[in-house]
Amino acid sequence: MTGNSESGQPNRGFIGVTPRPPTLEDESYLDFMEGVRNFTIRELFPVVGTQVVEGARRAGLPADGAQASPKELRAATDAIPIVGTWKRIMRSQQQMTWNKLQDSFAAERASYTRALDAAEQQRPGGLEYDPGFQVPDYAKYPIHLQPGGYVGDDLAGYVFHHGTKVFYQGDNDQDELHQQIVNTVREPANGAVKRVLDLGCSIGQCTTLLKQRFPQAEVTGLDVSLPLLRYANRRAVDLDVAVQFRQGLAEQLPYPDGHFDAVLCYILFHEVPERLFQPIINEVFRVLRPGGSYTIVDAPNAKELPAPNRFWLTYDAQYNCEPYSPAFVASDLPALLTNAGFTGIEQASTDMFLSATTAVRPK
Ligand SMILES: C[S@@+](CC[C@H](N)C(=O)[O-])C[C@H]1O[C@@H](n2cnc3c(N)ncnc32)[C@H](O)[C@@H]1O
C-alpha cells in the first residue's frame, strides 16, 4: 500500500477506470489467477469439449447430448480424467480469487468502510435506500462462489469488482464489454430520453456508461444489494459521473407508471428464480412510458444445446453456484415479453456469446 486517499481508502491509484488492488502482491496474484482462468477456458476447454462429445456419443445420448439431462451428461462424462480436472481447476481458481480478495479487503475493513461512507456524504441523495429493507432469501446465494454472495459482506462491491476483472479474462479491464452492452440499448421510439434505468446494476459499470451515452438523462442504477450499490456510489464519485443508485427489487420497482424512457437489464435474469421472470418483465413494462424501450442482454435462450455448452451450463449450476441459469436458458424470452404487452421484439448475438433482446412498450 503506498498511501491513503482523503476518504480513508487505501489507494494505489487507478489504471484507467479500474482501481488497482490493495497491494502489489494482490495484483500479482490476481494476474496469475487470470492466467490460470485463460488457460483453463481458452486452451483446456476445447479439449474437454471434444471429450464430452465423445463421452455423450458413447453413452448413446441424443444429438451429442444436446437434450441430455444434467444427470445423464454427468454419468457419461464424469469418468473422463480431463473433465474432472477441468472442473476442479475452474472451481479452485474461482475460490482462490475470492478468498485472496476477501482477506485483503477485510484486513483494512475500517478504512474501506470509511471510503464508502465518505462517498455517501460527498453526494447526498446519490444513493437511496431504506435501512429496514429486507433482502429476499433467493438473493442470498453465494453466486459464482463469492463468499457471502452479493449481500452478505459490507465490502462485497470491492471484492466483486476485482473478482469480475479476473472473470472477464482481461477483456473488460477498461469496461470495454460494458460499453458494448450499453451500445446495444435501443433508442426509445420518439428519441426523447429523460430517464434511464439500469436494472440489476451491481457496481454501476453500465450505469455510468449509460450516463455518457445519454448525458441529458437522469440515469439510475437499481439493485437488491446495498454493499454493491455503496461501492457503485463510491466509484461514481471517483469517476465524477452524476448518476443515482437505489436499493430495490426488480419485481417491485419503486417508481410510478411510465417513469422511464429506457430500461437495461444486463445479466440479471439468469440470476433470479424462474418464478420472477414474468413479474420482472411486467414491472418493466409498467414503469416504461409508451414508446419506451427495454433491452435485455443475457445468456441466449436455447432448449437444445451442443453437449459442450450443456456441460458448461451444468458445471456452472452445480459447482459455480448459478442455481437459476438453466431455467433462464430454457425459457422463452420473446414469449415472456409478448405476455407483458411488449412489441417490436428483436434478438441479436453479441460478441460475448450473449444475446441482446430489445422490445418496445407500444404507444
Ligand atoms: C450478474 S449481476 C449483474 C451485473 C451488472 N448488470 C453489470 O453491469 O455488471 C446480477 C445482479 O442482479 C442483482 N439482483 C438479483 N436479484 C435482484 C432483484 N430481484 N432485484 C434487483 N437486483 C437483483 C444482484 O444483486 C446482482 O448485482
Image (cartoon, grey):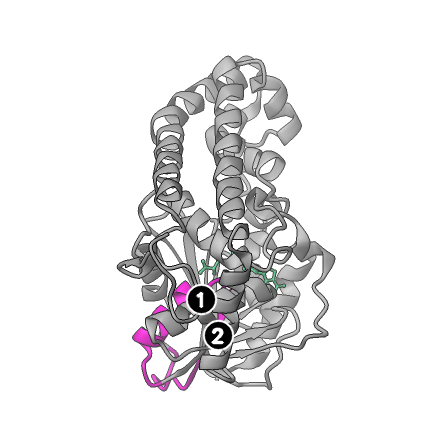
Residue 190 shown left or right of residue 282 in the figure: left
Question: Would you call the spot at circle 2 few (<14 residues within 10 Å), some (14-19), or many (20 or more)?
Answer: some
Q: Which residue is more in the foreground, 84 or 19?
A: 19
Is 209 within the magenta?
Answer: yes
- Label 1 to label 2: alpha-carbon separation: 8 Å
Q: Quadrant of residue 224?
A: bottom right
Residue 2 shown left or right of residue 108 in the figure: left
Q: Which residue is more in the foreground, 214 or 244?
A: 244
Q: Quadrant of residue 38?
A: top left
Residue at horizontal 41 percent and vertical 27 percent from the top: 45
Residue 238 locus on image (x, y percent): 36, 70
User: Residue tagged by mark 1?
Assistant: 8
Question: Could you tell me the amino acid type at mark 1?
Answer: Gly
Q: Which residue is more in the foreground, 30 or 24?
A: 24
- The magenta segment is 188-216
Q: Is residue 63 visible?
A: no
Can you tell which mark lies on residue 118?
Answer: 2
Q: Quadrant of residue 320?
A: top right
Is 220 within the magenta?
Answer: no
Q: Is residue 103 depicted above or below 44 in this figure?
A: below
Quadrant location of ligand 1?
A: bottom right
